[in-house]
Amino acid sequence: MEIYLVFVDAIQNSNKFWAAIVEDGNLTVQWGRVGYQAQTKVHTLGNHQRAVSKFNNLVAEKKAKGYSESQP
């Protein structure tokens, strides 16, 4: 599973991204301002199902904040 989300607010000068990928029992998340070096965090969750569950929760949180799907 993989997703790439962006948030753009010209008034606030905000242009940021959030990306996540599930590989086995790990969820790797990257975020930052578009065009700059990303920050990365790896969540080691032990099994694929827990990683997918965490992925879905985080995606729902980001979409609720106004992020939308895009291409990297």
Image (tube, rainbow, N blue to C red):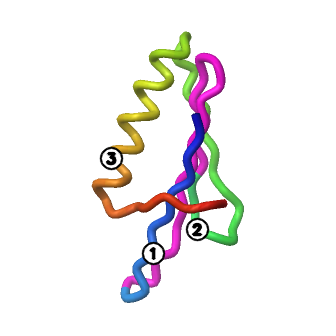
Q: Are marks 2 and 3 in contact (CB under 8 Å)?
A: no
- Residue on which disc 3 sits: 61
Q: CA–CA distance between discs 2 and 3?
A: 18 Å
Q: Which is in the foreground here, disc 1 or disc 2?
A: 1
Picture quadrant of residue 42: top right
Q: CA–CA distance between discs 1 and 2?
A: 10 Å
Q: Amino acid at mark 3?
A: Glu
Please tell me how crowded label 2 is: few (under 14), some (14-19), or many (20+) other residues with Cα within 10 Å.
some
Stretch in magenta: 12-30
Q: Note whether 23 is above or below 12 in the view shown.
A: above
Q: CA–CA distance between discs 3 and 1?
A: 16 Å
Q: Quick check: is 29 in the magenta stretch?
A: yes
Q: How far across and how far down the image is residue 69, in percent?
A: 49, 58
Question: Going 66% across and 56% down the picture, which residue do you hit?
Answer: 38
Q: Which disc number belongs to residue 8?
A: 1
Question: Going 59% across and 30% down the picture, which residue do you hit?
Answer: 22
Q: Quick check: is 14 in the magenta stretch?
A: yes
Q: Secondary structure at mark 1?
A: strand
Question: Going 71% across and 61% down the picture, which residue do you hit?
Answer: 37
Q: How far across and how far down the image is residue 23, in percent?
A: 65, 25
Q: How far across and how far down the image is residue 62, in percent?
A: 38, 52
Between disc 2 and disc 3, whose residue precedes?
A: 2
- Residue on which disc 2 sits: 33
Q: Which disc number belongs to residue 63?
A: none
Q: Amino acid at mark 1?
A: Val
Between disc 1 and disc 2, whose residue precedes?
A: 1
Q: Quadrant of the C terminus?
A: bottom right
